[in-house]
Image: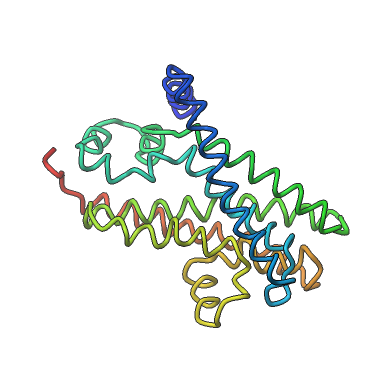
Amino acid sequence: MSLYLKALSLHLKAELEYKASFIFSFLSQVLIFFAYYFVILALFKRFDNIRGFTLYEVLLCFAIIQFGYAVNEVFARGIDKFDTLIIQGGFDRLLLRPKNLIIQVLCNDADFIKVSRIIQALIILVIALIKLNIEWNLMRVLTLFLMLISAIVIFFGIFLLAASYCFITVQGLEVRNVFTDGGKYMAQYPIGIFSKGFILFFTFIIPYGFVNYYPLLYFVGKKDNLLYGFSPLLVFFYVIPCIIVFYLGIKKYSSTGS
């Protein structure tokens, strides 16, 4: 962990060497993020609800998913850009070092400009919570916490799967983007608004449903079953095969020759 924290400090120092560029890039991310936010607002200007979900319930989903994705964009950027690491031959060097490979890949890159998205997601989360008038108790606090943590975990697992795909081919980024960027845009809405096939796929194959749909039903009082509140814990089991697949890919890896 000390190695990772040291790497983060070095990446932050490097980004701040060009302060004007950092500030303008930071502000551009703010504008891009709010563009997504205003799309949802525009949608609810036309409709009062989407299959029973109100504006602030959707914004709660939006904030949780965007928070989890942004955290990974900042702190797991090395995994997200794993294809570059392989193409440039950097992964070969990591294999020679006596440290955990996933930690080394995480140390390879960070993107502190995306911290703006974390802050904005938390702001929208707070606004949604205020407007929803939640009847707070210990279980609802725990459910919200689990939703936020599971959002981080699921995208970390998806990033690992995308990195594992690079052992097969370093091309075909569009295929990976379907499950990273595409998955993020889909999961920022409650999956209950989609068809049954989508719900099954994004519950049992890529378990977005356990991040911000089933726990959301409990959190806002649509369901009383406590299992819905604890359902984000299932996402932690999802990341285990993702790690296994990544290490299986390492065993099959042969250098790109860079």
Q: Is residue 97 above or below residue 127?
A: above
- Whether residue 253 sits left or right of residue 50 in the image: it is left
User: Please, which residue is most extreme toward the top here?
Assistant: 17
Q: Is residue 247 above or below residue 58?
A: above
The image quadrant of residue 59 is bottom right
Q: How is the image coloured?
A: rainbow
- Whether residue 192 sits left or right of residue 165 in the image: it is right
User: Please, which residue is most extreme toward the bottom here?
Assistant: 196
Residue 64 is situated, as x and y percent measured from the top left of the image, at: 63, 53
Work out whether residue 39 or residue 84 is closer to the camera in this orientation and state it. Answer: 39
- Whether residue 255 sits left or right of residue 24 in the image: it is left
The C terminus sits in image quarter: top left
The image quadrant of residue 53 is bottom right
Residue 193 is situated, as x and y percent measured from the top left of the image, at: 62, 75
Residue at image position (63%, 68%) is 190
Work out whether residue 128 or residue 89 is closer to the camera in this orientation and state it. Answer: 128
Q: Is residue 208 above or below residue 101?
A: below
Residue at image position (83%, 53%) is 138
Residue 221 is situated, as x and y percent measured from the top left of the image, at: 81, 68
Residue 92 is situated, as x and y percent measured from the top left of the image, at: 21, 37
The number of callouts visible is 0
Residue at image position (75%, 54%) is 128
Work out whether residue 25 or residue 129 is closer to the camera in this orientation and state it. Answer: 25
- Whether residue 84 sits left or right of residue 254 in the image: it is right
